[in-house]
Amino acid sequence: AQTVTQSQPEMSVQEAETVTLSCTYDTSENNYYLFWYKQPPSRQMILVIRQEAYKQQNATENRFSVNFQKAAKSFSLKISDSQLGDTAMYFCAFVTLWGAQKLVFGQGTRLTINP
Amino acid sequence: GAVVSQHPSWVICKSGTSVKIECRSLDFQATTMFWYRQFPKQSLMLMATSNEGSKATYEQGVEKDKFLINHASLTLSTLTVTSAHPEDSSFYICSARVGGIMNTEAFFGQGTRLTVV
């Protein structure tokens, strides 16, 4: 069974700072996708960034980038120049390419950006 | 991205009654839909996976007779909470996926807050 672990329940940084959220996962599969989702106070789940396991290059979306270490099964999210609107719960998630393709979520990290 | 609409956004019902929550994919056909439950300050817990035209697959510990799921078309799945009790109060979220090994992104509805009084 696949598991996803986020070891930081809460984090807090000042506006404009850079913050890194950690995520590790466990799987015996070789082909999978990893995601970071953001859940703001509205509770709408928003996809932040996606990484295909077969790609060595780390994904980047504007201020958001990941550090994907496949051998270590690590998938951290870096937010640069943090903004007040980045305040949210962040969930790391994993899905295999085969089978039921169920998203497996981590426990979440509550990120607060302070003015 | 694709749009998934969930209705209602919130509902209050009396204990013992049933409540139906709808999940619609507005601009794509969803071969698979997922239903989650989220307790305050916790992660999303998968309840069941529904595929169009077939019975839903429930996760271990989820009562299939209490949480009825119907995926009657490629754009609509419903979750009915039967004989609701206060402990069923929670935030329910659906997600939908196009399907296929390369279409792994899931699109989420806005969620439904259920309060049973």
Image (cartoon, rainbow, N blue to C red):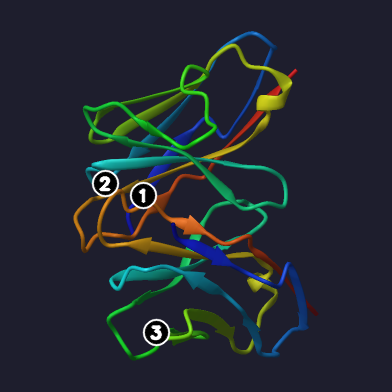
Q: State the count of labels.
A: 3
| Residue B87 screen position, x and y as percent | 71, 25
What residue appears at the point 31 percent right and 31 percent down from the top-left corner?
A: B76
Q: Which residue is mark 3?
A: A59
| Residue A42 screen position, x and y as percent | 63, 51
Q: State if disc 1 and disc 3 touch (CB < 8 Å).
A: no
| Residue B72 screen position, x and y as percent | 26, 25
Chain letter for mark 3, please. Answer: A
Q: What's the residue type where badge 3 is placed?
A: Ala
| Residue B66 screen position, x and y as percent | 52, 18
Residue toward you, A36 or A6: A6
Q: Nearer the viewer, mark 3 or mark 2?
A: 3
Q: What's the residue type where badge 2 is placed?
A: Asp
Q: State if disc 1 and disc 2 touch (CB < 8 Å).
A: yes
**Around disc 1, counting alpha carbons within 10 Å, would you say few (fewer than 14), some (14 to 19), or many (20 or more)?**
some
Q: CA distance from mark 3 to mark 2?
A: 27 Å
Q: Which label is found at residue B27?
A: 2
Residue toward you, B70 or B60: B60
